[in-house]
Amino acid sequence: MARSRRKNKRRPMAEINVVPYIDVMLVLLVIFMITAPMLTQGVDVELPSANATPIQDNENDIIIASVDSKGQFYLDVGGKQESIALLELQDKVRKVLSQNPKMSVLVRGDKNVPYGDVIGLMVALQGAGVPNVGLVTEPETN
């Protein structure tokens, strides 16, 4: 009977301890701060300089075909960049343009690459059905 008179004085706690959640969020923040710059790496292409006005386009509506100083071809569609053979590049561009024919196609060619490699890339793009190709240059500094 002594037990029945004694009421349970413990009540459920209505507060949440948020310190562990803050610790986890800070760790995730540090991880994202370290990995974010690694995700934006590109092809090391030394572009020729030219005095031209830049084109303002949505990055998702652009296909960028690149050739580096070693003659290796790259394709960047919607921010996803990959090393690719010339014939595969042509097929992939054809497929992308069949889904979205209004996409702009740009060519980035290293200034040390032989002119024939850039022309070969442009011919492959023409074979994929690209009507117009823009050439990417580095802005001229005075």
Image (cartoon, rainbow, N blue to C red):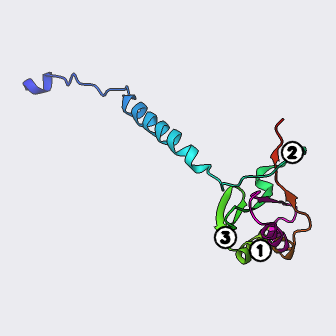
> What crowding class fits label 1: few (fewer than 14 Cα within 10 Å), some (14-19), or many (20 or more)?
many
Q: Which mark is residue 98?
A: none
Q: Which mark is residue 90?
A: 1
Quadrant into which the C terminus falls: top right
> What crowding class fits label 3: few (fewer than 14 Cα within 10 Å), some (14-19), or many (20 or more)?
some
User: Residue 135, located in which quarter of the rendered image?
Assistant: bottom right
Residue 11, how many percent across, how many down? 28, 25
Q: Answer with left or right where residue 70 lies relative to residue 100.
A: left
Give the spatial CA distance, label 2 vs label 1. 26 Å
Q: Residue at x 81, y 74 (%)?
A: 124
Q: Residue at x 87, y 69 (%)?
A: 130
Q: Which mark is residue 84?
A: 3
- Residue on which disc 2 sits: 54
The residue under label 1 is which amino acid type?
A: Gln
Quadrant into which the N terminus falls: top left
Q: Are marks 1 and 3 in contact (CB under 8 Å)?
A: no
Residue 136, how many percent across, how many down? 82, 54
Residue 40 versus residue 120: which sits nearer the camera? 120
Residue 63, how many percent across, how many down? 78, 60
Q: Is residue 131 above or below residue 33?
A: below
N-terminal label among 2 and 1: 2
N-terminal label among 1 and 3: 3
Q: Are marks 2 and 1 in contact (CB under 8 Å)?
A: no
Q: Is residue 18 above or below residue 123?
A: above
- Write the start and end of the magenta stretch as one range: 97-123
The residue under label 2 is which amino acid type?
A: Pro
Give the spatial CA distance, label 3 vs label 2. 27 Å
User: Residue 90, located in which quarter of the rendered image?
Assistant: bottom right
Give the spatial CA distance, label 1 vs label 3. 10 Å
